Amino acid sequence: MPTEVARYWQHAAVAGVDLLRARYITHRYGRHAHETYTFGLIESGTEEFEYGGTLLRAEAGAVALLDPEVVHTGQAATPAGWSYRVLYPEVGVVAEVAAGLGWPRGTPRFPQTVVHDPRSAALLRRAHQAAEHDDQLASSSLLTVALAGLLTAHARPGGGPAPAAPRAPADIRAVRDLLHERLADPPALAELAELTGLSQFALLRAFRAEHGLPPHAYLNQVRVRRARALLDQGLGPAQVAITAGFADQAHLTRHFKRVVGVPPGAYQRERLPAAS
C-alpha cells in the first residue's frame, strides 16, 4: 500500500505564492476556502471535490482552477488515491500578471473549474518543478509564464477590484465580526441569534448562504488562518493552538491538516527552515 506524503512550502523567489506537492489516499479535506487562487495539476489517480455546490472529478492530466474564497472539499475518488502539484498565488500576484497582459483592473475569474489542456498542464508542471530548485530567476520566470498562460486560456477579466470584505447583510456581518473577535471563546448559537433577531435556524441558513459554511465551520477556518500566521511568526504549535482558539494541539492538528493538507509542524518546518 503506497504511503501518503505531502510537502507544503513558500515560493523562494516570489512573495505571496505557496506550493503543495502531495500523494493522498485516505486524506480528506474538510469544507474550506482559500484567500488565494488554487491551481492544481493531477499527476496520477483521481481527485473528487465539491466546489460551489457541484461535485467534480479531476483525473490524471487535468488542471483544477479554483477562484479565491469559494468553499470546496477534496478526497480520493478511488482507493488508489491521487497525487498532484498545487500553486496557491495570492490575488495580487495574479492581478499583477493580468495587468501585464493589458487586462482591466479587477479580480480574474475562472469559469471552468476542471480543464483538460496539455499546454496549461505543462506550464503548471514546469513552474512547480522549478520552484523545488534554487534557481530563483528560472522559477520566478516560469511562474509568471504559467500564470499568464492560465489566464489567457481559461480566465475572464474581473468586473472591478475585489471587495475588502464580503458584502454581507448587516446582521450576518455582525455575526462574522463577533466570531473573529472571539476565536477562543465563541458565543453559542442562541447568543448569535439574539444578536441578529433571527431564529437559530434562520441564522444558520442565512450565514451559510453568505459564506458557504455554517458559523462553527467558518470559525474553524478563521482559526486555521490565524494559526498559519502565528506559525509563520515562529510561535510553537502548542502555543499557536491556545492563541488561535483551539482546545489543544491535537485539535489544531486535526483541523489544520483538513484545510492545509499537512500538520502544523511540517508546515512550519518548511516555512522557517533556519529555525528548525
Image: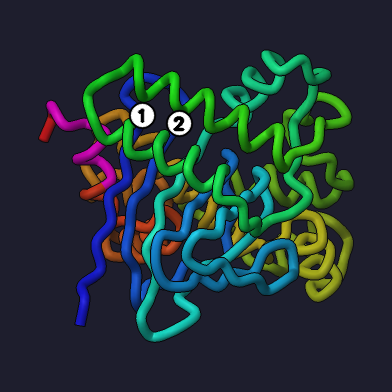
Expressed as whole percent of the image width and height from the top left, the position of residue 37 reads: 59, 41
233 inside magenta stretch: no
The answer to whether 97 is drawn above or below residue 33 in the figure is above
Residue 109: x and y, percent? 75, 40
| Residue type for callout 1 | His
Position of 150 compared to 101: left or right? Answer: left
**If the image is split into quadrants, where does the C terminus sit?**
top left
Q: Which residue is mark 2?
A: 17
Q: How is the image coloured?
A: rainbow
Residue 183 vs residue 28, the one in the foreground: 28
Q: Secondary structure at mark 2?
A: strand
> What is the magenta range?
267-274
Residue type at tag 2: Val
Q: Where residue 223 sits in the image (x, y, percent)?
A: 48, 50
Relative to 165, residue 263 above or below: below
Category of crowding for the residue at label 2, using alpha-carbon neighbours closer than 10 angstroms: few (below 14), some (14–19), many (at least 20):
many
Residue 165 visible in the snapshot? yes
Q: What residue do we see at 47% from left, 28% from top?
A: 143
> Which residue has dot 1 on it?
11
Q: Secondary structure at mark 1?
A: loop
Q: Is residue 1 left or right of residue 258?
A: left
**Front-lying residue, 148 or 91:** 148
Q: Residue at x 65, y 59 (%)?
A: 114
Q: Is residue 211 left or right of residue 167?
A: left
Please indicate, yes or no, whether residue 246 appears anywhere in the rendered image. no
